[in-house]
Structure formats: structure tokens, C-alpha cells
Image (cartoon, rainbow, N blue to C red):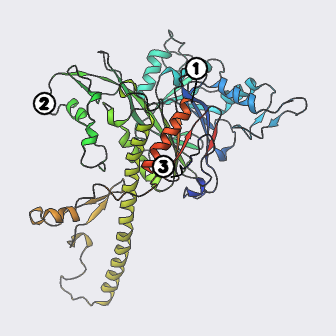
């Protein structure tokens, strides 16, 4: 069978924008510039991205940074490669760049570092940090003190990330306190984000999203990035345990034993035992789970979104599995074509054994996680398909009721119109939850229901019918690849080939892109 090629080092599928289903679907809405695509060991290429809404142009504060393991030097390098020769002599200044990731940007200097400094000082206001490991923050830390502007840079993240910066980075020991807290220099201001979004912000599809720039909103979720085997005061997530001296990461994931993957917020055994529920094992030690995060970044005008992960481990071997909740959040957005891309790490190829993953992913686990996502997308589509006939039938019944009420004469007694709330339905009415799922209510006593009736009328199907290519139209961008620095095939090529091999069996339908520094992606 001929292998289907993916969009590895190029733009996303040209069909992407047209499949988005939004008002401005024919036009790109978001640009992501890859400053750093690797996870080490070369320090010049570690995780860093710039995101901007295309319609905003290159206006002040229009760009946000997602992580900043590298920053200024990477911007300068990209400009050095794309600025035309002869600037200031053969090519007059100011000049509008015609090619490269910064096409359309007006530059005023022939020096690429000077132009990069302008981008950093004036165009990038906010930095969203997924977690405080050095390969995700070092560029931000070093660059911030060099270019003080008229307003502080915003450093946004989960409270645990902000706490780590305050305690371990901007503490006047590792680095001067550049923040505006604890009598700092005031060059950085912290924004502590609410996990899952704030219900008081936004409306409709944008509910819970925080405006992080004039034309971008974000919502953050916590994910797990491995665990620490030291015995110490807990630093990360509190939702995991270590049983005796056995490392429970080698045990089967509680999620794999679930009857159905359709239950939002499924609770694992370790969460149950950590919260005081009975357990067969009494000898427990606390285990620190490293917290990372994932950001939904949204253009509120078009509704287009990208999902960008920090470092993350697979749920199936995690002490604190949290990816399922994000897939459930993403599934409706994929079903309605608003989520265009997922940026997710794949640090190693499949030769890396589970005991040496250190909280990272490989191609086999990427596919495993995407299969879970695909199941959630199918479930959403399944329920949407069921809701449509119900809505149509309800409209028909309402019309019949109106005609009946108009044509049937009523007596002066008590047999007048009855409130719809007092009518006892003949079947099992269903309500729609905030997630779009149908929630059954039983109108017949359960004692009168057979198991067959219960399954047919009350319980949702455990596994919706599997369709081919459930993730078609979605780009999956691979980031944080760790180079081996050996002769032979590069790790990036190996990871891509392994993903395509898995995809030939999984038939998910998504486009895989292995990112590289200097790349521009539009969605």
C-alpha cells in the first residue's frame, strides 16, 4: 500500500483554512513562528515559539511568546537569513520584508540583531510559560534585563510556574529580581492563570478565555511531566502516590481499566487513594509529579485555535494522568473545525524504553494519545448527530401542539392547557450537558427495566462506531525533539517515519509536521 505523505517541513495542508468552518475560514488567522524546535542538548535550539493573529499585522504588542528557551538570538538568526542584501545602500530603509517568517514587517536597520531587538522590545509583550525548566525559560530570563521598555513584560503561567520563578529564578541569587513583586526591578509582571479558564470571562465559544493581547485569548490546562523519585516536600501536583518502595509508573494505568472513555474527568486509583478513600495498600509515600501545561490559543474573531503543549508524558504510564481532560476539551473544537493544529512534544524515537522517558513522549505514545483524542471526537460527532433529529422532532411536535391548541375548543373546567413542565413524557427524556453530551433521565422505575431496555434507552454506547480518518483536517506539529548527535538518520526523520508507520495502521487522518527552527506555520 502506498504510504500517505504528511506535511513535515512545510506549511499545513492548504485545505486547512477552508475546512475551518468559521466566518473567515478562507483566510489564515494565526501564524506560529518556530524559534526553537528541539529539546536539547544544543542550547541554541530549545523550545520557543511566537504566535500572532495575522489580521493584526506587526503592531505593538501583537505577538505572544510560548516558552522562551531561546528568544532574541533566534529572532536575529531568522532575520539574518531573510533580510535582503544591501540594506541601507542598494535597498533603502525603512524596508518591508517580502519573505520569511517576518514577511510584512517594516525594519529600520541593516543590522539583524538591531531589528530583532525591536521585535522583542516592542512587538512581544506577553510570555506564556508551560513550565519552568531551563530549556523553556532561559532566553526570557537572559533577554529581559537587556531591553527595558515603557511597560513590563507579562510573564503568564499556572501559579506553580510563577511560584518557581519567584523562588528559584528571580530571587537575587540565580538572577536579579526583575519582577514587580518583593521590591523587584519591575521589568516583569506576573499573571497567574486559572487552570481550565475563568468562568467569569468570555462568552459562548470564548467562555473562560483570558485576553492575553488585543487580538488573542488563551485558556490553560495542567499536564504531567514525569515524577521525581526524591523524598522531599512536594513541589508539583498532589494527585499521585507512591506505594511502598514500588515505583507505580511500571504498573498498568488505571485509565486503561475504565469501562468507558466517555466519562469526563475520570478519576484514577491514585487520586482516590490520595484523597483518603479506602485502599488495600497502606504504606504510601508522597511522589512529586512535575507540572507542565497546555495552552489553547484562540483568535476570537475567526474562532481559529491552536493547542500548544509543554513537555508531557503519556497518560498510560503517568502517576497523575491528565491528558484525557484536554482531549475532551479539544474534541468539540476539532469536530466543528475550529482547532486547526496541536503542537505536541516527541522527545525520543521508539527505541527509548519506558523507564528512560523522563516524562516525555515517543511516536508510539503520540499515536496512543491521538487515538484517545479520536475516540472523543467521534463521541462528540455521534452525540451531535443524535441531537439533530431530536431537535427537528421537537420542532415538529411543537408545531403540532400549537395547531392542536388552536383547533380544539376548551371547556370552562380545569382541563385547560397544561404546563409543559407537568406533562409526563412517554420515553426517557434527555438533557444536553455543557459538554454537548446527552444525559438520560429515567421516567420508568428501574425495577421495570430489563438490562436490554437499560442499555438501549439509558446508557450511552461505550464505543461509538469507528470511522476512518476521524482527525482529518488537523495538523499535529512535533516539537521538542532531542537530537542524538550521531551519524546516520536524524532523530527527526526517524520520528517522522515511525509516526507514519503507526498512522498507516491507526488511520487517524491528521497531518504530521516535524517542526524546525525558523519555520513559519499559518492556520
Which mark, residue 206?
A: 3
- Who's the residue at 24% across and 32% down the image? 270
Image position of 57 (left or right of 154) = right
The residue lying furthest to the top in this view is 173
Q: Could you tell me if the residues under marks 1 and 3 are in contact, i.e. CB atoms within 8 Å?
A: no
Q: CA distance from mark 1 to mark 3?
A: 37 Å
Q: Residues within 10 Å of mark 2 (few under 14, many from 20)?
A: few
Q: Is residue 95 above or below residue 446?
A: above
For mark 2, what is the residue?
Answer: 280
Which numbered disc, 1 or 2, marks the residue that appears first in the sequence?
Answer: 1
Name which of mark 3 and mark 2 comes first in the sequence: 3
Q: Dots 3 and 2: beta carbons under 8 Å?
A: no
Q: CA distance from mark 3 to mark 2?
A: 44 Å
> Of circles 3 and 2, which is in front?
2
Q: What residue is disc 1 on?
A: 43
Please rate how many residues cluster around mark 1, counting C-alpha atoms within 10 Å: few if below 14, some from 14 to 19, many from 20.
some
Q: Is residue 143 above or below residue 347?
A: above
Residue 242 placement (x, y as % from top left):
24, 24
Q: 194 above or below 522?
A: above
Question: Residue 468 appears in which quarter of the rendering?
Answer: bottom left
Is the residue marked by circle 3 packed among few (<14), some (14-19), or many (20+) residues within 10 Å?
some
Instruction: Say whether residue 204 is visible.
Output: no
Q: Is residue 391 left or right of residue 8?
A: left
Q: Position of residue 322 (x, y in %)?
A: 35, 37
Percent across and percent down for residue 50 are: 60, 34
Amino acid at each position: 500500500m502506498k504510504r500517505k505523505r504528511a506535511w513535515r517541513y512545510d506549511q499545513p495542508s492548504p485545505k486547512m483554512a477552508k475546512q475551518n468552518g468559521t466566518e473567515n475560514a478562507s483566510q489564515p488567522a494565526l501564524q506560529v513562528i518556530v524559534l526553537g524546535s528541539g529539546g536539547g542538548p544544543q542550547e541554541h535550539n530549545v523550545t520557543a515559539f511566537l504566535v500572532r493573529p495575522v489580521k493584526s499585522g506587526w503592531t505593538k504588542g501583537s505577538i505572544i511568546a510560548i516558552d522562551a528557551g531561546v528568544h532574541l538570538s533566534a529572532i536575529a538568526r531568522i532575520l539574518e537569513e531573510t533580510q535582503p542584501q544591501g540594506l541601507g545602500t542598494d535597498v533603502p530603509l525603512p524596508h518591508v520584508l517580502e519573505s520569511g517568517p517576518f514577511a510584512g514587517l517594516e525594519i529600520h536597520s541593516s543590522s539583524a540583531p538591531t531589528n530583532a531587538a525591536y521585535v522583542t522590545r516592542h512587538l512581544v509583550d506577553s510570555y506564556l510559560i508551560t513550565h519552568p525548566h531551563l530549556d523553556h525559560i532561559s532566553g526570557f530570563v537572559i533577554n529581559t534585563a537587556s531591553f527595558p521598555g515603557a511597560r513590563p513584560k507579562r510573564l503568564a503561567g499556572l501559579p506553580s510556574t510563577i511560584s518557581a520563578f519567584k523562588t528559584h529564578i528571580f530571587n537575587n541569587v540565580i538572577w536579579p529580581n526583575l519582577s514587580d513583586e518583593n521590591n523587584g526591578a519591575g521589568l516583569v509582571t506576573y499573571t497567574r492563570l486559572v487552570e481550565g479558564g475563568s468562568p467569569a470571562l468570555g462568552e459562548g465559544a470564548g467562555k473562560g478565555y483570558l485576553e492575553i493581547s488585543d487580538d488573542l485569548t488563551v485558556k490553560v490546562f495542567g499536564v504531567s511531566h514525569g515524577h521525581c523519585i526524591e523524598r522531599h516536600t512536594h513541589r508539583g501536583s498532589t494527585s499521585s502516590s507512591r506505594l511502598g518502595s514500588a515505583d507505580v509508573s511500571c504498573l498498568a494505568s488505571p485509565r486503561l481499566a475504565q469501562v468507558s472513555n466517555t466519562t469526563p474527568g475520570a478519576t484514577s486509583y491514585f487520586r482516590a487513594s490520595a484523597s483518603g478513600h479506602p485502599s488495600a495498600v497502606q504504606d504510601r509515600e508522597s511522589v512529586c509529579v512535575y507540572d507542565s501545561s497546555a495552552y489553547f490559543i484562540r483568535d476570537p474573531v475567526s474562532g481559529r485555535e491552536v493547542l500548544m503543549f509543554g513537555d508531557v508524558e503519556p497518560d498510560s504510564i503517568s502517576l497523575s494522568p491528565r491528558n484525557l481532560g484536554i482531549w475532551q476539551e479539544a474534541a468539540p473544537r476539532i469536530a466543528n473545525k475550529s482547532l486547526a493544529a496541536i503542537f505536541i512534544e516527541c522527545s525520543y524515537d521508539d527505541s527509548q524504553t519506558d523507564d528512560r522517558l523522563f516524562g516525555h513522549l515517543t511516536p508510539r505514545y503520540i499515536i496512543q494519545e491521538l487515538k484517545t483524542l479520536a475516540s472523543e471526537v467521534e463521541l462528540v460527532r455521534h452525540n451531535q448527530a443524535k441531537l439533530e433529529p431530536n431537535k427537528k422532532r421537537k420542532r415538529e411536535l411543537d408545531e403540532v401542539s400549537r395547531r392542536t391548541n388552536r383547533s380544539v375548543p376548551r371547556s370552562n373546567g380545569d382541563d385547560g392547557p397544561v404546563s409543559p413542565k407537568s406533562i409526563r413524557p412517554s420515553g426517557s427524556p434527555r438533557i444536553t450537558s455543557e459538554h454537548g453530551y446527552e444525559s438520560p433521565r429515567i421516567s420508568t422505575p428501574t425495577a421495570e427495566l430489563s438490562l436490554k431496555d437499560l442499555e438501549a434507552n439509558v446508557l450511552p454506547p461505550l464505543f461509538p462506531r469507528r470511522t476512518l480518518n476521524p482527525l482529518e483536517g488537523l495538523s499535529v506539529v512535533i516539537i521538542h525533539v532531542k537530537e542524538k548527535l550521531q551519524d546516520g538518520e536524524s532523530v527527526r526523520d526517524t520520528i517522522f517515519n515511525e509516526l507514519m508507520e503507526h498512522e498507516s495502521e491507526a488511520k487517524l487522518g491528521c497531518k504530521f509536521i516535524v517542526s524546525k527552527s525558523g519555520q513559519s506555520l499559518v492556520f
